[in-house]
């Protein structure tokens, strides 16, 4: 493991994204892995980032880097 580990218990994968919550707005924000670990955020591997779920009534904002996007099939 070269990078930071996933925050999920028992997951041994490297983190690829960072999750933060904005409780006042009922919002979860998932973005590229932050430059350093933050105490009030969660670093997630690709599997856990893809499976992210939030409480009913919350919204999820997913930020992606343009270089990380997969080409669309026409």
Image (cartoon, grey):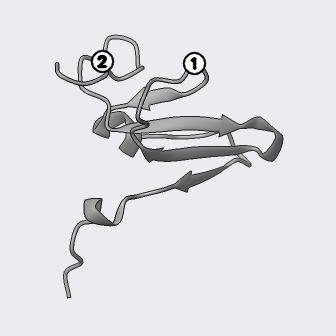
Please state the total of marks drawn on the protein image.
2
Q: Residues within 10 Å of mark 2 (few under 14, many from 20)?
A: some
Q: Residues within 10 Å of mark 1 (few under 14, many from 20)?
A: few
Q: Residue furthest bottom?
A: 74
Q: Is residue 19 above or below residue 1?
A: below
Q: Which mark is residue 39?
A: 1
Residue occupying image coordinates x 61% and y 23%: 40
- The local secondary structure at tag 1 comes to loop
Task: Residue 70: give x, y in percent of width and height.
Answer: 23, 67
Task: Residue 10: give x, y in percent of width and height.
Answer: 32, 11
- The local secondary structure at tag 2 comes to loop
CB of mark 2 within 8 Å of CB of mark 1? no
Depth check, front residue: 64 or 11: 64
Residue occupying image coordinates x 27% and y 63%: 67
Task: Residue 41: give x, y in percent of width and height.
Answer: 55, 27
Position of 20 with respect to 8 (left or right) is right
Q: Earlier in the sequence, mark 2 or mark 1?
A: 2
**Image quarter in which the C terminus is found:** bottom left
Q: Is residue 5 above or below residue 44?
A: above
Depth check, front residue: 56 or 1: 1
Position of 5 with respect to 36 (left or right) is left
Q: Residue furthest right?
A: 24
- CA distance for labels 2 and 1: 19 Å
Depth check, mark 2 against mark 1: the one in front is 1
Depth check, front residue: 54 or 12: 12
Position of 8 with respect to 14 (left or right) is right
Q: Which residue carries the number 2 mark? A: 11
């Amino acid at each position: 493991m070269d990078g930071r580990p996933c925050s999920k218990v028992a997951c041994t994968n490297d983190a690829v994204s960072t999750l933060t919550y904005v409780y006042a707005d009922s919002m979860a924000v998932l973005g590229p892995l932050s430059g350093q670990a933050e105490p009030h955020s969660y670093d997630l591997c690709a599997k856990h980032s893809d499976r992210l779920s939030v409480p009913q009534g919350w919204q999820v904002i997913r930020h992606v880097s343009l270089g990380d996007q997969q080409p669309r099939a026409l």
